[in-house]
Structure formats: structure tokens, C-alpha cells
Amino acid sequence: MNKDYLIISNNPLVKENFQDTIYFQGTLEELLIKVRDMVHQGHELITHPLGASIRMMFSPYKSILVSSEKKEFNEFFASIAENSIEDYRKNTFNRKTDYQHKNDYAMIDKELLQEALKEHVSLRAIN
Amino acid sequence: MKLELRKIKVTDLALGNEMKFENGLLTIDPQVIIDGLKDDVNVKDVRVDIAKPGDKTRIIPVKDVIEPRVKVEGTGNGFPGVTTKMEQLGSGLVNVLSGAAIVTIGDIVGFQEGVIDMWGEGAKWTPFSTTYNIVVDISVADGLQPHDHETTVRIAGLRAAEIVGEVARDLTSDEVEVYEMGNIFEETNKYPDLPKVLYVEMLISQGLLHDGYIYGVNSQKILPTLIHPNEELDGAVISGNCVAACDKITTYQHQNNSSIIDLYNRHGKDINFMGVILTPELTTLEGKFRTCDYTAKLCKTLGADGVIISEEGYGNPDSDLLMICKRLEDSGIKTVLITDECSGWDGMSQPLADTTKEAVAVVSAGNVSHVVNLPPADKVLGNPEAIATLAGGWEGCLNDDGSMKCELNAVIGSTSEIGYHNLTVKLY
Amino acid sequence: MTYKVLYYVNQFFGQIGGEEKADIAPILKNEKIGPAMGFEQLLGGEAEVVATLICGDNYFNEHEEEALKFIIDAVSEVNPDIVVAGPAFNAGRYGMACAGVATHVFDELGIPVVTGMYKENPAVDHCKAKAIVVEVSDSAAGMRNALPVMAKITKKILKKEELGMPKEEGYFPQGKRLTVFSNERGSERAVKMLVARLKGEDFETELPMPVFDKVEPAAAIKDIKKAKIALITSGGIVPSGNPDRIQSASAQKWGKYNIKDIESLKGGYYTIHGGYDPVYANEFPDRVAPLDILKKYEKEGEIGEIFEYFYTTTGTGTSVGNSITFGVEIGKELMDAGVDGAILTST
């Protein structure tokens, strides 16, 4: 079965556990920008780039799912990708990324990615 | 369904040699709780402490808060589907140790936050500084996987609430709150001219530390679903949310859901309150589209005239909130949203991540970035390291005199998006 | 102890002269002039106006850097506890000057500023976050009502008293969202709000959504080589001498000039825009409105033709209301003339 998604991640734990992760070494902000750029190039956003709480914004690691295929530019996804960067910056400009607990964040990010993958795969007609 | 909550008022709390309630004083024997919880092989150690309103005590990091109760008539004692066998909730007579709360601490990961200060400046910002708190610190067996760790602590907290709740079994009180509602047709026949109102309650449903449960079913697995308000008031919904201290819906807040209670109070007067729709907040966008469409469809199918929508969390759930709002408003259904905002330390930033012009009626539960100054505590229940995490967030956070600056987003229940607390935001 | 107030006014309120004196450089007078006199009386002896700064509105808008240098130095020297400016009512240039003074005094010297403007004055948005801008009427006839409000707020700020809500005190909200305690919990307020909505009654949202003025873009030009293109600018490029007297800031009008027979704007045009250094634009105005390039494209067949009229106005300090009006008026002329596309430059 063909994978229709790409994992964009700066989480070494995800790189270790998921084949074909597009892994890059950078900050969470850089990751959000990279994903934004990919959305502009036509990749569809599969997961929302932001976490569900402010605490998760201090994580050094994040994994985001986008479509592997490039499709027509989608304004809604682009606006989410852009707004996510703005929101991230607004919430973190005077806070430090929490490297002290990076292993915990790595583990939680991997868990959340796994759940997101389950969600994504279950939505497809062919299983 | 008819649910009666008999409120037995707790006005003092003490540790002692027995589990007893007399003249407002609740006495807790820690050993009873410890023995009860250690039935679970995954529980290694339990510590029980108390924290009373006014004590210079800080509790951190808080995992969940649960109200101790016991069902004396009707089905579903405990938490059916979770700690007890599956049974229907929403009817019967429940004795509630009102004013007491079980507060579980014990972090699954090092970055958990969530502070309750029982006195001083910090006390104003959390609703749990005015409850008599039985603080239960649970440590688990070595080598437990994170999922099992979370489950263990979650279940232990619920079990502790049941153990303490048992104290109320034979007690009585004059204060009984009655929640009674027939089916939608019966109620509409009674109040044909009142506008039909639904409450949409969004729940974080994204994975470990970000879960919710309905009769034990993980909310990530469900489609938006209709539930009778009595069921939630009777314990059908519990929290698995260990992040988002400021706006997580603790189990206590599900049991005492203020949106449900305030809507119920107006039922038959200004509104015809039809029920509650539980909507999961998913991570994938397809998932969000599905749940938002489905929620709007349920509201339309039920013929709602107005809907109150509450959120849990901050960040990606804001998209769901606004999508549901837009779909409802476009269908002619009037909405009121309850959300918190992030306007920066100075209150000058754009409050929400996304916007939609249809959101014309919004209640703001507060600015999560509002900075408060917390004085040094005499006693800390929990993990002092967590204070360092809280304080270590930015420069100059910990002051020389031991006081510290803390953003509201780290204070339990401060910006509750079910409207449980009383913060608001004004434009100056 | 009496606090020190420094008062800022333009050439008119500073009793120097009218429009003809709008280009005077700033001066500092160690006395109370114009509205400063009445203002001091309203302070009830708790503060005194020790000096008045006067600056021509055109001078400020066209030589902002020099004007501010003088003003900041003067304010530093006087070292007042507060600076009061205007009120500017609906005067755009005066408003922009007061806004400039307010933001720089606040940012550079940390001294609080109180001013007064009419709600449509474009300068309100430029300084409301940094100064307290009292809401006043649209003309100087409202001076009698404006000064007392400004004085009351000034006294509160001097005594470090907290200001009440903007509506109560009479100033424009600064845009600060403050978290405060309410008598009612959030869900009660939500239920009340919903009941009001369902009854069709008034309600006030606690979180106003920003309104974005979304304009649908027109369809793309099918064949650019056949298209009629118009050139428009808000960079204030006008024929030498500014025959139509378009304002350097807070424009009240736009101009239209026939450019059919010239190859570029050089020589015959210059800039009157008060918001940027004019040297390079005056040397070669096509840098702001590229007529020369368009003419080249027309000759080479890259575009069909250039519309014979060139439209111009000044963008800085121009109100949103006026901008919308200009856009609609110019747009109509272009539509009627069969123009396919327009290039609009701004600075």
C-alpha cells in the first residue's frame, strides 16, 4: 500500500522509529517554516502544525504530517501554516525552549504522531 | 432522567485514624487510601496530604482533580466503564462531599505543570484554592511504559475519590440539587415557545496526556455524540488531559460542569436546554473537518436555535472552535463561544491564532499570558523540580525573595473554557 | 508639589499664524501659549505648564527628522512630568505631528503623553497605544469640552492613579487586553449572552474579531500584449509646482495628469510626499511611478497601450475613509475608459 504522507520532523526519536521520516536538524520554529514552505509548494497539510496547549510550544521537537504528493495550492492550509508560525512566535518570544525535558517531549511527540497516523490511516477508504 | 445531588458541606479537613465526617469536618485516614490504591500492582507508593484554604501550601504539578461522591440510589456508583462495571449514569441519588476535592500529583513526564496555591495572590486565580484538598501523590512501579503510567495515576485518582466518597454513604443533608429532564419532545411540548439550546463541549483527543474518556471510551475514537447533561454531572466524562493546566477540564469540572449547570438553571425559563454534544478535538485536518461538520449537523438535526460552544486547550483546537461556529452561524444558528486568549504579557497582541467574522459573541476566559506574582510557599506538595520548570521558563522569573512570576497558563483552572472560573478580559 | 507640564501646539494654536505659517520650524517658549493657558487653569493648581513647543504642521510632516530632533532635545531640557499635545480635532497633519511627538517622547524619554483627536483622524491609530488619546469633536469649536477631559486624565496620570475604562474616561482604547475578575463566572456570562442573542437584544462580545477588508481580486488579464494599462501612485508624485495643491500628508484629494506626450516623469514632476526622503524621487520620479519603463514596454509591444492619464495622491496619514473614496472614484474612471489593468505604487 502506498504511503500518501510524509513525516516532517526534527525529533530524533521519530527518525529512529519511522522509516522515511524527512528529518531535519533545526528548531521547532524552523520546522514550522519548512512546513509552511512545503504547503506553498502544493503539499497538503494533514496534521495541524500546532499542539493543543501552550506547554507543548516549548517542546524542542515536533512532527508534522503533509501529503507526499503536491496538489493544487490550498489557501486554507496555507493560512493555517502561516498563522501557526505567528502564534508560535507570539507565545514563545520571551520563553525558552525546554531542552531540559527534551527526552520527555521527544517521547510525547512520537506518541502524538502515532495517534495522528492512526487517525489519518483510518480515514482512507482502503485499509 | 432525574439526578439528585445531595450536597454534604465540608468545612474542615484533617488527617486522623479513621475515615469520618462530623459537623462539617472530614477526617481522612491516609492508610485507608494507600491500602485501597495499592490493590493495583502498578502502584508502588502513595502519599496522602491535605491542603486547606488559607494554608501557605503550593501543590504542583497537578494531574487531575476529582470530587469525592457516592451513589446511594440508582445505577452507576464510581466511574462506570473505568473503575466500575458499565452501568447507565444520570439518574438516582448521589451523596457529594461538597467542598472537598481529591488532587492527584505525580508527573508522568518532567515538563508537566499545573499549580494550585492555597493562599495569597495565587489563590485568586484558581478555583481549587477554596476546596479542601486531599492531595494524593502516586508513584508507579519501575519500568512502566508512559501509557500505563498515565492510566495508573488516572485510575488511582478516581479510586481515591471513591474511597473518600464512601464516607458520605449514610449521611444526609437538606441541600439537594435536582437535575431533571424528560426527553426532548416532552420538554419541547412543555415549553413550545422557548428557544432550543444545545451545549457543544469540545474535548482534547489527541493522544498520550491529551485524552478524554466517556464511559471509559477514549474520545479520540468517537464521532461527536449526544449525551444527556445528567450523565456528565454524574461522572460519565473523565479527564486524561495532563497538559494545558489553565484550561484543562479536570474530572471535578466535568462532574460540576458550569456550562451545563448554568444552562440547566435557565431551562424552562429562558431556554429549552436539549442536551450536550461531546466533540473530540483531533489533530488531523480531515479529522477536524469531519468532527466540525458532524457537530454542526447534529445541532441542525436537533433543530437548535442557539448553541454554546466550549473549548479545551489552546493552539490547534482554536481552528475547530471557529469552524464549528462558522458552520452553525451560516445555518442561522446563534452561537456563543467560550475560549481563552493569548494577548501577550502586555495584552497588546492579537488574541486568537485564527479568526472568523462569524464569531460575534465570545466570552473570554482570560489571557493565558497574564503574569502573576506568586509568593514563596511554606509547604510544597509535589515535585519542587516542577517549580524550577515553571520558573525556568524565562529570565528573571524567580525573584531573590523566593517569589516567582508565573503565567496564568500554568495555573490550574484559571482560564477555564467551560466558564468555570470568573476571569474576563477588558479592553483598555 | 506641582508637576511640570510641557504643551505642544501647531503654528495656529501657537498664535504664530495660519496656513501660511505652516512651514515654521519648531520653537520652544518658556510660557503658556494658546490652549495651554486654559489647560493650566483646569489643573487646579496641581500642575503648571512651564513651556510651550510650537511647530508648523507642514514643517513637521516634511522635515520630521529635524523637527523631532529639536523637540526631543527641548523636552529633555525642560524635563516635564508629562507632555500634552493638541487637541488636533480632525486636522490630519496636526494629528500626525502630535502622534509623532507622542510616540517619540514616550519611546525615547519615557514621559507620558496626553493628546486629543477626533475619531476619524488617521493619527489616532498611530499613537493610541503609546499616548492617551482623548476623544474630542471634529473642530476647534469643541475645545471647551476637550480640555477638561484631557486635564482630568493628565492629573490622574501625574498622580499615578489608575485610569478607568476608556469609555468612562473618554479616551480611545489603547488596544491593551487586561485580564480582570468578573462578578460572574464565564459560563454564566455565556448563557446570558446567548439568551440576549436569542431574544434579539443587545449584547457585547468580550473578544471582538478583527475585521479584514477583503477585496476580491479581478480576473487575470488574458493577453497582456493587447491590454490598456494605467499608472497610479500614492507616492505623492505631482507636476512641478503642485498645481492642485495635493497635501503632503493626510491627503484630501487625488490628481490626474495627462502623460500621453511625455516619455518619463523626469523634469516635469517631483514629490510632495512628506513621508520619505525626497532626494532620489525628485532626481528621477519614475523611481516611484515607473512611467519610463511602461513607455518602453508600450513601444516594444509588451503591453497594448498606456492609459493617457496618470493618477496620484499621498498615502501617508491619509484616512482609510478617504482612501476608499479615492479608490472608488479613480476605479470608476478607469472602468469607463476601458482600462484592463493598473499598476499602483506606494512608498
Image (spheres, rainbow, N blue to C red):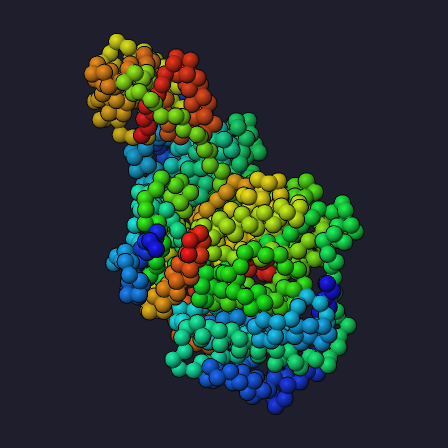
**Residue in front for this viewpoint, B334 or B83:** B83
**Residue in front for this viewpoint, B422 or B138:** B138
**Residue in front for this viewpoint, C342 or C35:** C342
For residue C212, say whether it is visible: yes
In the displayed orientation, state which residue is furthest to the bottom.
Answer: B17
At horizontal 36% and vertical 40% (from top left) the residue drawn is: A73
Specify the quadrant of the image occupied by residue C335. Answer: top left
Q: In the visual, does B272 lie left or right of C267?
A: right
Specify the quadrant of the image occupied by residue C96. Answer: top left
Q: Where is residue C179 in the image (x, y as percent from the top left)?
A: 52, 55
Quadrant placement of the N terminus of chain B = bottom right
Q: Where is residue B270 in the image (x, y as percent from the top left)?
A: 73, 49
Q: Where is residue B160 in the image (x, y as percent from the top left)?
A: 57, 79
In the displayed orientation, state which residue is furthest to the top.
Answer: C261
At horizontal 38% and vertical 80% (from top left) the residue drawn is: B143
Q: Is residue C185 above or below residue B62?
A: above
Q: In the visual, does C283 lie left or right of A93?
A: left
At horizontal 57% and vertical 40% (from top left) the residue drawn is: B330
For residue B396, say whether it is visible: no
Q: Where is residue B128 in the image (x, y as percent from the top left)?
A: 57, 69
Q: How many labels does the image show?
A: 0
**Residue in front for this viewpoint, A126 or B207:** A126
Q: Is residue B280 above or below residue C84?
A: below
